[in-house]
Structures are given as structure tokens and as C-alpha cells.
Amino acid sequence: MAVGDVAMPHMHVVKGVKIGSTEAYIRYPNRRDLVVFEFSPGSKVAGVFTQNAFCAAPVTVSKSHLAQVDARYLVINTGNANAATGQIGLDNAQLSCNELAKLAGVSNTEILPFSTGVIGEQLPIERLIAGLPAALANLNENAWLDAATGIMTTDTTPKGASEQFELDGIQYSITGISKGAGMIRPNMATMLGFVATDVPISQHVLKQMLNESVNQSFNRITVDGDTSTNDSCILVATGQAGGQELTSIDDPRYAELLTIVNRVMARLAQLIIRDGEGATKFISVTVEGGANTQECCDVAYSIAHSPLIKTAMFASDPNWGRILCAIGYAGVPNLDVTQVQVWLDDVQICRDGGAAADYTEQAGAKVMAQAEITVRVDLGRGSAKDTVYTCDLSYDYVKINADYRS
Amino acid sequence: MAVGDVAMPHMHVVKGVKIGSTEAYIRYPNRRDLVVFEFSPGSKVAGVFTQNAFCAAPVTVSKSHLAQVDARYLVINTGNANAATGQIGLDNAQLSCNELAKLAGVSNTEILPFSTGVIGEQLPIERLIAGLPAALANLNENAWLDAATGIMTTDTTPKGASEQFELDGIQYSITGISKGAGMIRPNMATMLGFVATDVPISQHVLKQMLNESVNQSFNRITVDGDTSTNDSCILVATGQAGGQELTSIDDPRYAELLTIVNRVMARLAQLIIRDGEGATKFISVTVEGGANTQECCDVAYSIAHSPLIKTAMFASDPNWGRILCAIGYAGVPNLDVTQVQVWLDDVQICRDGGAAADYTEQAGAKVMAQAEITVRVDLGRGSAKDTVYTCDLSYDYVKINADYRS
């Protein structure tokens, strides 16, 4: 059960983007597990990928293709990650591109492949290839929900965000989907995120926009601290809604659009946490008063990764000593603990490094009983601030991960 | 239920060490929760303590006292950590020393205080003080088991190690106890470990011996990655069994004795893992072929902390892709994954970065079904090697930590 409002919004059409999908029996029968995106000619495509050294075969191929030319198609399967699969895996990822390129009449470098699912098993490439014609046959502009469903693994709900907006009097759309619930501590991207807009944007500006946005969204979430082998996030600008191409970050439209992209990316990233494996709580960890962003993030992740804090959250137990403990081992150089303040929402639990005199267990318990909780830490040594999003650690996380594959 | 053989051995008397204990009702009634150690005059004492910035009040006091003079007494309570308790906590830790000093007729700096239990609540110092006469009244040489029991928190079993040995024809003893089951990823020491020998050793050599030994034992275990506020490990040399004082690490007895101390420390540290909260498996993670010790430890901890690997271990599921994934995000610079080999015990699961051709799921499942499992990784880039010990992540870990305090 996901936490809070995770409903799919109306998914606005993005001019120049079509989506087809099918049931290819990659791992399970009767399940939508193969998705193809088609972008209109001239679309600009930017991507960020996992920094895991054991990055998956499709990640290697996508990075290589994207470095050569803007993509016209994405081919995405769930059920198998095609990671730790050696040369055969690389060949299979390449083969999926070659076959789709043939069917679509484009160059194979114009295809980006993506996979998600079990690591270490070979992709059933024949089934994937056999599914391509059916996916291409139902390409249409209104299939974002199908796409969101077709990339799920342990996700309990499809994840989408979509907005319409005006820039210089022209109406545009931005629509995106994401997936992921476990093995989530993205480093440069999420498990999988695909976002498209019909604003015309140059490749250079698009890449900058994606980097900025991912660093405040997908790179600020963690379920279990496990950085996946397959994290990928793609931002596409088809330019099909018209207007002048955005070619500089000094163009005033850049800041306007970045705000919207950030909002969509943040929503897609936070949806992953709301649907975190076994999650019953959505937890924001804000660390302010840091000397720099790095130490704010170090402290926030230290709290967000602590199994003791995550289980206390699950139990709605304001066992705040565990929070101080996690701050204490985050490795902040020369931390003066007497300057540290900690709040649960608006309830101050720690003042100047010790229990706040006016804190009551009752007040703490009231906050902890909520489904959405903010832990706020003030380090009292600077003006940097950052926020990381996470969920609690429940019986169901163990159940899901002890049972997955079986 | 602890994993494997955790039985208390015969706890040999260490000449010059007496132990008294009592039920002081620190947190729960009818529970041995206050322990006093007495060392004969002239004993040398070395200690290592947590590096958590929010270190507990007794840690601060013990470090200060130990810097001034060798200790004659330890006073240890369970049920309350006296951590994140501010000036009141420091005063209470000092008060416990003052009161014991008065009763024992020594200086208060000759007392080291230790606490373990809930963080962030004030120590009930009156009850602790009220219990001191009873603890002193039953001081005796044969109370190591009582001491091991009297320092337990969520531990399910008391933890001890003891050996007799000869150096230069003289018979000596070494006996120690430890405690801890959760909030375990010691950094310089364990939750609590107390080890004593009657070999005469100079303060300087004793300190060196403790550091070397702790780095191969208590600093190589993790249950949940949470470095506690109270970690402390004390090594005492009473010298009461006679012989010449060991004053140099070049003395051949040093190496002989170090081997024994290492064995005792390793046993005490591993007992903590065998009794890790909710543990059903005892897992050794050995990383070899590293360029240096640091990267071996980084990879080993990456595996040992991964909730995905720990839940797979719990489920006896040889989901080895998760192991490669954890190696991949451990941050080893320029790791060539095609050089990486991985074994579960003697079963090679990964060869040259991909699935080993001769690996069968059956063979992997057989190893994973065992209660004791070794994950061995060869990074293929050097000759450094290190081992970290951990346990699995089960429903009971969540249960214990969701319920603790209640």
C-alpha cells in the first residue's frame, strides 16, 4: 500500500510522443512488460544513468547511442534487468535495438534500450523481439498510463506526473512516468524515469536542465540505500508544440521551465518513496544550518538509511535518541553537538544537543503516528540546506525482498 | 535465537580481577543491571571508545579519567545509555564515580563509568548509587558470568571468551565479556567489551595491543550499520600472575600474546553478530584481491549493509545479482568488473563479472540454506584482504526494533 496520494493525474498528451506496449512474457505471462516510445524527428533527448560499476547492458548501450545521436525510440522491458549478464547481455541489448531499428526504419543508434527486473539472468531476447511488432502496432499519444503500468516491478501503483503550462503565450505539456520501489538510492538517476515535453529545447540546455532537476529529485531519495545497476532517467523535448528553441540557460523561459520540470521530477521521485517496498510512512529529512550541501546530505542520508530509525518510524515510536545517534556518526567534521536542534514536524525534540525541556513523549508520539513525517535538523554551523526523502522499514520490506524471485 | 555455538565457556579466573553485581532497577525490576569491576593496585588499563559525535556522558568521563590515571574500578549499568543527556548526564556519570570512589576509598578519577540502553533519557542516578554497596559486597573472582548477564540489553545470551596459556613457563589467563545485538557497527570499539589478563604489561604496550586487536575484531562487525553512542572496549592487565612486565612490542611474548588476545576479541565480537537482533544467519564477507585494505572494507561493508542481500540471506535465496550490485556501488575507483569473482562458500557464482557458466541455482541454494555462510569476493586488482562479519535481516529485526522501549 503506497503512502498518501499517489493517484495518476490526467496524463496530458505531449505532441511528438507516441507509446506502444504489449505482453511479451519476459518473466510472467499476461502482464504488460514491453513498452516502446516513439519521438518525432528532431526531438532532443538527454539522459543520466547509474554510477554502479556493474551497470546493466542496456545502460552501457544507451549511453553509447546517446553520445552519438538523438534517440527516436526507447525500448523498455520489465521482468529482467539484463545486468551482470556479460557479453551475451550486451549482445542482447544491441539485438533489441537492431530489430526495432529494422521495423521502424531508423538507425540502430537511434534506439535506447532499458531493462528492469531480476539481476544476473539472461534476457529472453526472442520473446522481446517477438513482442516488438505488437508494441509498434498500437503506438499512440494517449498511452502514458499503459507505459507507467508496463514498466512496474515490485511497484504497487503506476507513477505519473503531468502539467500543462504557457511560455510566451504558447501552450505546452510535460508528462512523465517513473518506476521503482526497492534497490532505491539513485546516484545520478532513478530506477527508471521518462519525462517528455513538447517545448523546443536545444540538446545542451536540455542536458543541463536534466542534471539540475535530477539532483533535486531522483538523487535525493532512498528506500534501502542500494544503488541499482539500471538507474536511468530520460528527458525528451520534441519541440512539436512550436515556439522558438530554447538555446540558452539565460533565456528567461529556462528558469520558468526548470521550475516546472523540477516539480514533475520531484513528484515522480517522491512517488517512488510513497510506494517504497513495505512503506507505511513517507519521511522527509531536512538538514539545515550546514557548512555545505555535502554535510547536509551526509546527515540526511545517515538518518534516512538507519534501520533503527526506520523501524521506529514503522512503530510510530518517537525514539529520538536514534536520530541523534545517526547524526553523530554521519562523519561531519568537528560537529559541535551543543549547537544541534532537531524537530519532528513542529515539535522540537532536541535543543542544543540534549532533550528539549518542553518536549513531551505525547507530542512526539502524535507526530510519529502520522503517515507523513518531517525530521528537521539544524546543525547550527552554516547556511546550507538539503532534503532527502525516504520511507520506514516494515515487516513487509523483509517479506517482499525475501520472497521476490520466488 | 543466536546462530551457532554461543555457549559460555568456562570463565577462567583472572588474578587481580573481582566482579560484583546487583539488581538496581535502572529500567526494569528483578534484573541484574549494575556491575562493578575491581582491579588490583598497579593494573594497567587501556580503552577505545566510540567516534560518534553524540558520544554518551560516561564515554566522555571515562576518556577523561583514563587519560589521567589507570583505573581501579569500572561501574557499568544497563537499561539506560546516559547519551544525549546534556550536562545533567555528565553530572550523573561523574556522580556515579564519586560515590563509588567514596565507598571504595580511591580517587574518583580511578573509576570508569559505562552505560548501555535507551538513548535520551536521564539516568536514574539515585537507584544506581543505592545499588553500589550491594555490588561491592559480593565482589569475587568467579563472577564473570554474572557480569556478562548484567550488561545485556536486547542480547538473548551472555557473551564470554576465556583462555589459559603459558608465556615463558608462567601460566596466565585471559577472560572477557561483551554485549550488543543492535545499533552495531562499531567504530573503534564495540557496544561494550571488557577483557582482562593477569599478564604484566606496560600501559603503552597494552594500548597498542588493544588497538591492533580491536581493528581486527570489534571494528569488523556490523548488524545494522548504526554506530552507537556508547561503544567502549577495555583491556586490563593486572600483572597478578607474575613474570616480567611486557614493555616492548619487540618482546617475543608480544606476538604470542597478541594472537591470543586477537582470538578472544574476535570471539567476543563475533558473538555479537551471532546474537544480532533477529539474526538467523552468521555471514562472513571476505574481500580479497583489493588494491588496499580500505577498498576491501568498503566492498565488504557495502555487501554487509545491503538490506536486499540481508533479506535474501534470511530467505536462503541465492539472489546473487544483489551481491554484484552492492560491489558495484561500493565506490571502488575504476573497478574493472570483468576481473571480479564471487563465491558462496566454495560455489563460484560469478566469474569475470558475469554468471559463472558452471553455477547452478541448486548449488547456490544449498549454501544459502546453511546457518553460516561465507561470501568471498576477489576484486582481482591487488593483494589486500579483509573480512567483515554480519547477520541477515529478518522479520524479528523489525519486530525487536519496532517494539524496543515498549
Image: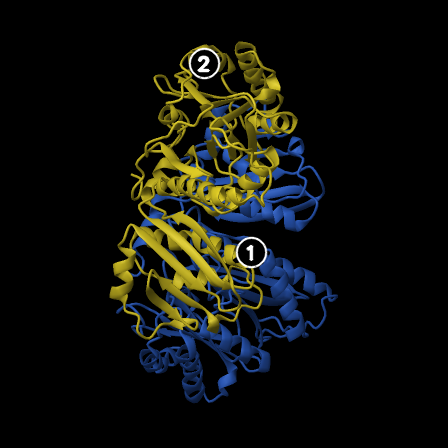
Chain colours: A yellow, B blue
Residue, disc 2: A136
Residue B219: x and y in percent read 56, 57
Task: Name the residue: 26% across, 65% down.
Answer: A363
Which residue ends up furthest to the right in the rendered image?
B250
Q: Position of residue A105 (x, y in %)?
A: 56, 11
**Residue type, label 1:** Gln
Secondary structure under tag 2 reads: helix
Determine if residue B59 is in view: yes
Q: Is residue A395 above or below residue A67?
A: below
- Mark 2: amino acid: Leu
What is the quadrant of the C terminus of chain A in the image?
top left
Q: Quadrant of residue A99?
A: top right
Could you tell me residue A398's position as x and y percent?
Answer: 37, 41
The answer, for residue B271, to whether it is visible in the render is no
Residue reaching furthest to the front: A169
Q: Residue at x 36, y 36 (%)?
A: A400
How many neighbours does mark 1 have within 10 angstroms: few (below 14), some (14-19), or many (20 or more)?
some
